[in-house]
Image (cartoon, rainbow, N blue to C red):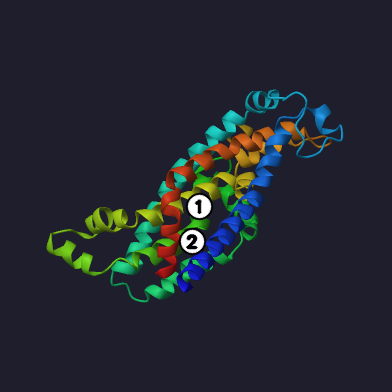
């Protein structure tokens, strides 16, 4: 009888957990549904007093075509992918080298060096806008992707080192000794042993860094002024008029811009939780 009661309690507990997860998933999905339903409405539908979640009589797919062609969203997404697919791997490489040095090499006062990197996470990008503008103007880095990469990597290094350092510390040091006996140098140790083991942490960092780079607005709006070089976040601002905004067109652009991030998450999502948990344990 006691076993039956325990079993029923377990089933009831699991049911509450799943119901709670479904509610949270629905709350998370509502804004996406709202954006999609708005994107398939014409201007007349939007200003007719129709409810947010009401379907229009005629689905207005033209918003997607106009966003891609007239709004030049395709160009902005191409620029955004170019920036993200260069900056993210390059940033992870630099952060992995730093985390490896802090956890596997005999560096004096490594904790102080680590704290120095972490302090950078506490400084908001807004504080650096004026210095960046002045310095970049003198160095002719305004409207260059090199300047954008430099700023992005500088602001993202602290978090990347924090996550990778935590995961690297969970990898036994005995593996280092075994690798040295087999004739591995430090670079071979990093690239052949440490990084393959840390694949979950790297995948997690890739997802978060890609998302952050894809959606970043403040630095991109200051460094890149040329419309042909703008990324998605700044390019979408061209959809917003001074006196009037075509909400359906803007929603279509936002919905299309979600697709690359969703693809990256689906590819690496199985490593996501494992990578975060390993970093926290470290």
Q: Are marks 2 and 1 in contact (CB under 8 Å)?
A: yes
Measured as percent of width and height from the top left, residue 82 is found at 49, 37
135 relative position to 82: left or right = right
Residue at (63% x, 37% y) in the render: 255
How crowded pointer 1 is (Cα within 10 Å; few <14, some 14-19, many 20+) is rated as: some
Quadrant for the C terminus in the image = bottom left
Say above or below: 40 vs 27: above
Mark sitting on residue 141: none
Measured as percent of width and height from the top left, residue 211 is found at 54, 48
First-in-chain label (2 vs 1)? 2
- Viewer-nearest residue: 159 or 229: 159
Indicate which label's residue lies in the foreground, 2 or 1. Answer: 1
Say above or below: 1 vs 20: below
Q: Quadrant of residue 175?
A: bottom left
Residue at (76% x, 35% y) in the render: 247
Q: Is residue 177 visible?
A: yes
Say above or below: 131 vs 107: above
**Residue sitting farthest toward the front:** 1
- Viewer-nearest residue: 88 or 194: 194
Give the structural element (helix, strand or loop) at label 2.
helix
Q: Quadrant of residue 57?
A: top right
How crowded pointer 2 is (Cα within 10 Å; few <14, some 14-19, many 20+) is rated as: some
Cα distance in 3D space between marks 2 and 1: 10 Å
Q: Which residue is mark 1?
A: 208
158 relative position to 253: left or right = left
Residue at (65% x, 38% y) in the render: 254
Mark sitting on residue 159: 2
């Amino acid at each position: 009888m006691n076993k039956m009661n325990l079993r029923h309690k377990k089933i009831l507990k699991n049911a509450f957990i799943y119901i709670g997860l479904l509610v949270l998933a629905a709350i998370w999905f509502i804004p996406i549904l709202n954006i999609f339903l708005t994107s398939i409405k014409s201007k007349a539908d939007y200003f007719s007093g129709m409810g947010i979640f009401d379907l229009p009589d005629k689905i207005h797919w033209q918003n997607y075509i106009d966003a891609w062609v007239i709004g030049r969203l395709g160009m902005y997404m191409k620029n955004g992918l170019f920036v993200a697919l260069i900056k993210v791997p390059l940033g992870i490489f630099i952060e992995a080298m730093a985390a490896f040095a802090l956890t596997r090499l005999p560096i004096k006062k490594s904790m102080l060096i680590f704290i120095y990197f972490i302090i950078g996470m506490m400084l908001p990008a807004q504080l650096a806008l004026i210095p960046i503008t002045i310095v970049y103007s003198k160095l002719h880095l305004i409207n260059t992707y090199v300047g954008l990469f430099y700023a992005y990597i500088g602001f993202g290094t602290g978090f990347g080192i924090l996550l990778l350092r935590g995961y690297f510390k969970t990898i036994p040091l005995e593996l280092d000794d075994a690798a040295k006996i087999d004739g591995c140098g430090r670079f071979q140790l990093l690239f052949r042993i440490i990084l393959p083991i840390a694949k979950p942490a790297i995948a997690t960092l890739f997802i978060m860094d890609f998302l952050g780079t894809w959606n970043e607005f403040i630095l991109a709006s200051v460094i890149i002024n040329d419309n042909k070089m703008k990324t998605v976040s700044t390019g979408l601002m061209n959809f917003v008029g001074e006196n009037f905004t075509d909400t359906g067109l803007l929603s279509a652009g936002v919905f299309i811009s979600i697709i690359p991030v969703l693809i990256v998450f689906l590819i690496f999502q199985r490593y996501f939780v494992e990578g975060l948990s390993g970093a926290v344990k470290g």
